[in-house]
Image (cartoon, helix red, strand yellow):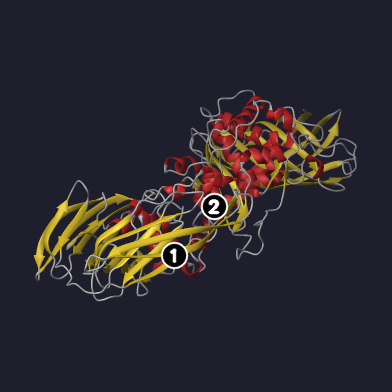
Amino acid sequence: MIRFLLPLLFLSILLSAEEPPPGEMRLQAALEAQPNGDLTGNLRFDLAPKNYAAVRGQRRSAVSALREFRPDGASFECASDCAFRYDDAVTAITVDLHALGVARSVAPGRWEIGVSREADLVTSKEEKGRTSFHFYEVGQTRIGLAYRGPISFQLPPGATESTWDAERRTVGWSMPTVPPGEARLESQVSVREGLMPGLYKLYGMPDLFPDLWVAHVVLRNAGEGAARDLRVRMRLPGYADWSDVASDAEFVPGQTAVVSYHPLLDRSITTLRATTPIDLAIEWSWKGADGAPHEGRETQRATFLGGREFVFSSLRPEEVTGTFQETFSNVPLLAAWVTRDDPVVQQFAAMANKNAAGVGAAYDDGDALKAIQACYELMLLNDFTYQSPRGLDDPSLSFDSKLVQNLKYPRDVIRDKSGTCIELAILFAAMAHDIGLTPYLVVKSGHCFPVIKLPIGKGLVAVEATGIKGGVRFGADPFEKVLFEGKKELEEVQKSGEFVMVDVEQAWMEGVACPELDVLPGDIMKQWGISEKGVAGGLMPRGDGEGSTGDKAGFAGKWVGDLPQVLEDGKQHPSPAEVLIQADGEGRYRMFATMQATGGAGKVQQEFVAEEQEGQLVFQGTHKTALDAASGESKDLEPDRGVLKVDGGNLVGKFGSDQLGFVDVKLTRK
């Protein structure tokens, strides 16, 4: 297809992270080049009903949608008559397209337009005195949905000498040159608000990140004659040299040139600690019909944020219609904050791996879960705490603090022993990568949490990292609890569809580069007071302790033993278990049990609420989940209940369900 309208990108923006529907998406496109280089036409995407229901309403305007369809650095501007519609009757999405400045003049009277590598030329022919090229495109979206369909591309009236360059992937044609006359250029410059120094490497990669421009210049020839040798360049003094010159050999009346500025920024820009204005210089020049030189210039103010500040949307205010996908369009770029191969994070992850007894997390699901647990508990041992998000350093800017945040890098979270939900999730993702696991970041409105893929069964383990709360001294949640909370959150966002799930390692492969960080001393962890054994006050959550306030009966602590499971066959099946009991107020408790599933094929996790009644602990399950180690799939089961009491230093009592019966249990304090 014409370069900036690849269905691959179109569907990657529109489709949610839910499973793809059966079958294929049908694509139909009828496009027409105009004499002034504009591109008009109609695109239709027919989706299966299930998929259509998932994407319905995620985009509401052609402007906001088409803004992101510019691979290979192609620049365009969507005209005001673009339209974007959902057709519920036939479960289709249609786009009435009018894009400015798509074709360019490579020589007087000679034009070119780029075509994607997924499109195969079928034929070209004359139709009613005009040349048409017919392509057929077959591909797959980033979520795995196959698509195929025909694309017709018609040259302007009067076009001659049409060509197809298979190597360069361009369609070319000739047009009569414009008679001499006066050219008059009108300019419109847009400078992106809130430029992010943390992404300084990405701004200079237009082929990979076409929407990460610093400035966007639209020039229009409003005169009666053509300009020759139109040239445009830009620079940011002190941080980027003059850009490569963008040029058109002939700039005809009514033609639009759209130039996006993608500077190679100097690393020094990351040293900015607060919002900083920088003058952006823009120059353009051309020759009139008589060969006389003309020029124009403009200075615009570009605003760079502090070095660690992150803007959640790449769209300009006039482009946003309020959908979740528009509001969080930059979220995949958070992978740049998951600092890859930082020695500081590697040391911290190695400490967690030691605490997990040096397990090979990448080769066994059970060992992977132990390592994930060790990562969380290492933060507890070192007395990490959760903190509220910070907004911009400059409150005068017109940003919602929920949509712009100052984000620490993982090493900073380790140093400060505290972080927001996003910062803790980013640290967790970096640690998971360093111990050989595949991390994801799940972002929903107002929250972020990490998800880790198990290596064998490929199941997903969600962790509510903010469970560290105010540290163990002030009520941190045990690992069992943060797993329960993470699982519930992941299920909730999958049902709502309003979330972005960032595959961190895939984002790195697609070019999201981490910034260069300063080299720190080899003993920096010691200087910060970080160790695998933890620090004073950084203890594992084991309840309030036997005999303390809220636990006069001595139930609180970690207990191990056997919680036999009674299955449908009516027999008891051994199930080694670890049970954590926390005092949760006078006479009330929380319980978390991790049990070996029958046959050793996985684990069963349960959460209980409990209450002391006449010296006994009466408990009722609230959640029970079985995880299959082979497939990674989980399913909810009917929770158990029971009663326990302390006898001779052990916990003894009954455990089971009304449906399958109860068994005797005996647990020993660990």
Please name the residue that numbered disc 1 is placed on.
298
Q: Quadrant of residue 663?
A: top right
Residue 517 vs 46, above or below: the answer is above
Coordinates of residue 234 in the picture (x, y in percent)? 42, 56
Q: Residue at x 60, y 38 (%)?
A: 567
Q: Would residue 475 be seen by someone viewing this image from the given angle?
A: yes
Of 182 and 543, the residue lying toward us: 182
Coordinates of residue 622 in the picture (x, y in percent)? 69, 49
Relative to 589, is 615 on the left or the right? right
Label ID, residue 152 = none
Relative to 156, is 61 on the left or the right? right
Please name the residue that numbered disc 2 is placed on.
196
Coordinates of residue 373 in the picture (x, y in percent)? 65, 35
Q: Would residue 597 be seen by someone viewing this image from the given angle?
A: no
The CA span between labels 1 and 2 is: 23 Å
Q: What residue type is labelled 1?
A: Glu
Q: What residue type is labelled 2?
A: Met
Residue 61 vs 4, above or below: the answer is below
Crowd tier of the residue under label 2, counting other residues whose Cα lies within 10 Å: few below 14, some 14–19, many 20 or above: many
Q: Residue at x 49, y 65 (%)?
A: 316
Relative to 298, is 168 on the left or the right? left
Coordinates of residue 493 in the picture (x, y in percent)? 55, 55
Q: Quadrant of the N terminus?
A: bottom left
Of 67 and 142, the residue lying toward us: 67
